[in-house]
Structure formats: C-alpha cells, structure tokens
Amino acid sequence: MLSNGAPEGGLTHTQVRFFQDSGYFRLPGLLSPREIEQYKAFVLGEKRREDAERQAAGSGPVVKLYGLYDRNRGLMDRLIINPKLVATLWSLLGPNVVFVTNRHNHATVNDAEGTKDEARLHRDILQPTRGLITAAVYLEDSTPENGCTRIVPGSHTLPYVGVPQLNGGGTWMDEHDEFAGLLEQALPVAMPAGSVLLFTGLAFHGVGLNLSGKTRISMTLGFRAADELDAIPDDSRQVMVTGSQLYRGNDR
Ligand SMILES: O=C(O)CCC(=O)C(=O)O
C-alpha cells in the first residue's frame, strides 16, 4: 500500500493525467489465458441459452447480453475485484469505488449481424456531473478487422447537449449538428484478449463494424466513485468494489 492508502500497481500521476486529458486508458494483461477461457465459456453459455429462448419466441440471436452480474455473481465478483483493475480505478476515482449494475453490465458478441445497429458513436451517460468509467474487457483479440472499439479522444470535454436517446443510455453523436465535424475523428483501439480499455462515459465511442466473419467477444462494465451526497445509496443497483459508501452531506 502507498502512503495515501492507494493499493500498489495503480497509475502514475502522468498516466492519470493522460486519462483525464484523452478520456481513455489501455490496460493490457488483466486476465490470464485461463480466466479468458472461463469468461468466454460463461458468455457463450449464456448466449446459447438466451438465443434458444429468443428462437422459441421468434426473435433473432442476441448481440448484447444484459444483467451479467446476476447471471453469475461469483465469477463477476472475481472480475470486479481484480487487483490490477481495482488499483487502476483507485488511481482514477479515489478510495471508494462502486460497480454499477444498471448501466452496461453486459457482454457483446460482435459479429457481422450484431454490429449493424450498434456501431453509432455515443456517450454512455448524458450529464457531465454523472461520473462513470466504462471498462471494456476483451475476451478475444480486438482489431480494426473484427470491430474493435472506436473512440474520439478528448471528446469527453465537449459540452453537454440535450435530447437523450429515448431508452436509457447517453447521447448519439450523429444526432447533434454541433458534433458533425468530429464524426470522422474516431480512432480504432486494437486490444489483445485479456486486456481492458477504460474510458470516461462522456467520451464518444462505439463498437466497430465486424468484417472478419468471426466473433469479437467482450464484456462492458461501469464503475464510479461512491456518491458522497447520496444519503440512501441503492444497493440493489451497485456493488462496493473497494472502500465504503461514505456520506458527506451537511443536512441540518
Ligand atoms: O464493445 C465495444 O466496443 C463498445 C461497447 C459500447 O460502446 C457500449 O457498450 O457502450
């Protein structure tokens, strides 16, 4: 442990500064080959089960599997308390970090069909004061050919624009004329299997089009600092990762 209480293995000040300026940080080598296989088997098993249910109901295969945490809490708990991940989140968010279960908490099986409707650049949250760090955990090598994540570096500093998408989520970039001149600035971020791409939920990003004929499987998780002005945190929608749910309100 360091003198400020931070766990060993976190980011340096320079790296934190890079994240704050650019909006993203690549974290290679988080999962071992055995863990990659375990999480992949979990996601594919859930997909088979859900696809069978959907087929019986006359729907096509699922692209995003939501509610991952409740599908296997033991396995997901191990991931969200991964020491390297926690040390990194501590560097970025401070000592009290929660995993949110009502944003992301999903796996994406990116294939040629799946990405058609998913590839638009977006923010994961609407309001600049709603902190959220998105962690994309790659279970297969993610490349420009198989639809790696694209991100517009620095776009988290662009101002708030209204008109949210109707059903949850953040903001579609292509619905805002203010940002039209930046749509071509998204860069593909290639990531090896077992690595994690962290980015602020305000940075415009999107899954890439998968032209490889193979899948690109990932899990997407959301983290934030415990809300110090929330007197009654909703523990049915968040899981403490490290620290505690402190309350610092000055009610009278
Ligand atoms: O899977 C990806 O590449 C990006 C995921 C994403 O954009 C999201 O879940 O909000």
Image (spheres, rainbow, N blue to C red):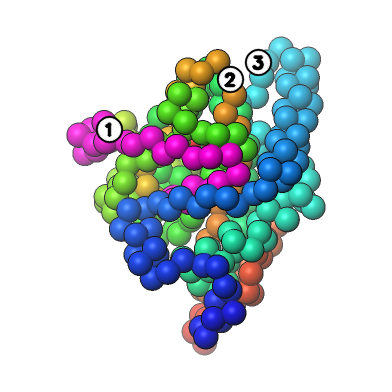
Please tell me which of labels 2 and 3 falls first in the chain.
3
Q: Which residue does the numbered mark 3 point to in the structure image?
A: 60
Residue 161 place in picture, x, y as percent = 30, 45
Crowd band around label 2 with a 10 angstrom C-alpha radius: few (<14), some (14–19), many (20+): few
Q: Which residues are magenta?
A: 176-201
Residue 102 place in picture, x, y as percent = 61, 49
Element type at mark 1: helix
Crowd band around label 3 with a 10 angstrom C-alpha radius: few (<14), some (14–19), many (20+): few
Given the image, on which type of amino acid does mark 1 rest?
Leu
Q: Which residue does the numbered mark 2 point to in the structure image?
A: 214
Q: Is residue 131 above or below residue 112?
A: below
Decide if residue 167 is on the left or right side of residue 102.
Answer: left
Residue 27 place in picture, x, y as percent = 50, 52
Residue 85 place in picture, x, y as percent = 58, 59
Q: Marks 2 and 3: which is nearer the front? A: 2
Element type at mark 3: loop
Q: Is residue 106 above or below residue 133?
A: above
Element type at mark 2: loop
**Res 114 quadrant in image:** top right
Locate the N terminus and report the quarter of the image it occupies.
bottom right
**Res 2 quadrant in image:** bottom right
Given the image, on which type of amino acid does mark 2 rest?
Lys
**Res 67 quadrant in image:** top right
User: Which residue is painted at 43% across and 28% down in the image?
Assistant: 144
Q: Which residue does the numbered mark 1 point to in the structure image?
A: 183
